[in-house]
Amino acid sequence: MGREGRSCSLRGCARAQTLTGVGYSEGFAPGRVVWICALWALVHSVLSSKQDKDLIRRIAGPRYCDGMYRFAFNAQSVVLPFWAARRFSRPPDRQLYRVRPPWSRLFQANQAASLGVLLSGVRVMGLSRCAGLTSLQNLLAGKDVRPAPEAPRGPPLGVDDEVVRIGAFRFTCHAGNLGALEFFLFLPRMTSNRAVLVVLVALFVVLGSMHEEYRLRAAYGDAYERYRRVVPFLTPRVSRW
């Protein structure tokens, strides 16, 4: 009887653990996704503000601020999303749908095209300029360091003082934001946590693009207004494809 009792007890514990594991994997944690995204957006917004940059300039001096600020800002923009992705990968979560082959190949192709849009924007802006590598190299080499452009994430001005319309900037004013949004929209496997993430990414992309619009207008003036009359804000016009 003792052995049978212990056996039944062990089976009961195993059954309870199994049921607990099922319930845990079938749940999801939207609150965790929201607070992680809110924390990242807060850090990103604070570090990108003019007040924060002016404070760093007063503390570190103009040379070190101009030489290291853009590179450090982009470094945290890479590190924090990787940290957030690791947090998102932890359960609980619940699968909403999974696109199977061959249709999943179409989703993956769209993701590849989205990355192409993002990289096209980076190429037009210049990788060294966009990432802050040029300023950092000049600082380390003891050369003169020029202040970063007021709107480094937008299309640059050409030799004719007009906003350039090449690459992805022929179809959208915010190539980087559009590419990031489309990448998340075409995830072949969608879970509850990922769905919350996609909504937050879409909100951040729209608000971030509106903020960039303000900075681009302040930096380029009438040249950007003329550019906006031809190129759509975010979503490309079908006729242009």
Image (cartoon, grey):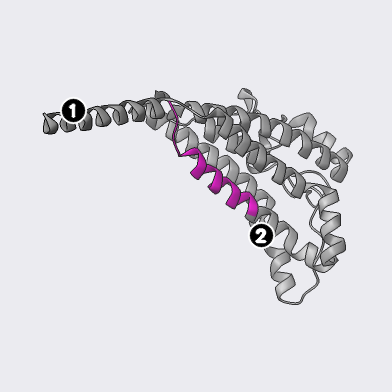
The N terminus is located in which quarter? top left
Lower sequence index among marks 1 and 2:
1
Q: Quadrant of residue 97?
A: top left
Q: Nearer the viewer, residue 192 or 206?
A: 192
From what the image shows, is residue 234 above or below residue 83? above
Circle 1 sits on which residue? Answer: 8
Residue at 24% across / 27% down in the picture? 12
Residue 122 location in percent, x, y?
63, 49
Disc 1 is placed on an element classified as helix
Q: Nearer the viewer, residue 34 or 63?
A: 34
23 left or right of 212 in image: left
Q: Quadrant of residue 163?
A: top right
Q: Residue furthest bottom?
A: 142
Query: Looking at numbered disc 1 in the image, what kind of residue is underneath it?
Result: Cys
Circle 2 sits on which residue? Answer: 128
Residue 115 location in percent, x, y?
53, 42
Residue at 86% across / 55% down in the picture? 54
Name the chief secondary structure element in magenta. Answer: helix
Residue 102 visible within the image:
no
Question: Which range of residues does the magenta coloring cover?
Answer: 76-94
Label 1, residues with CA under 10 Å away: few <14, some 14-19, many ≥20:
few
Residue 88 lies in the magenta-colored region? yes
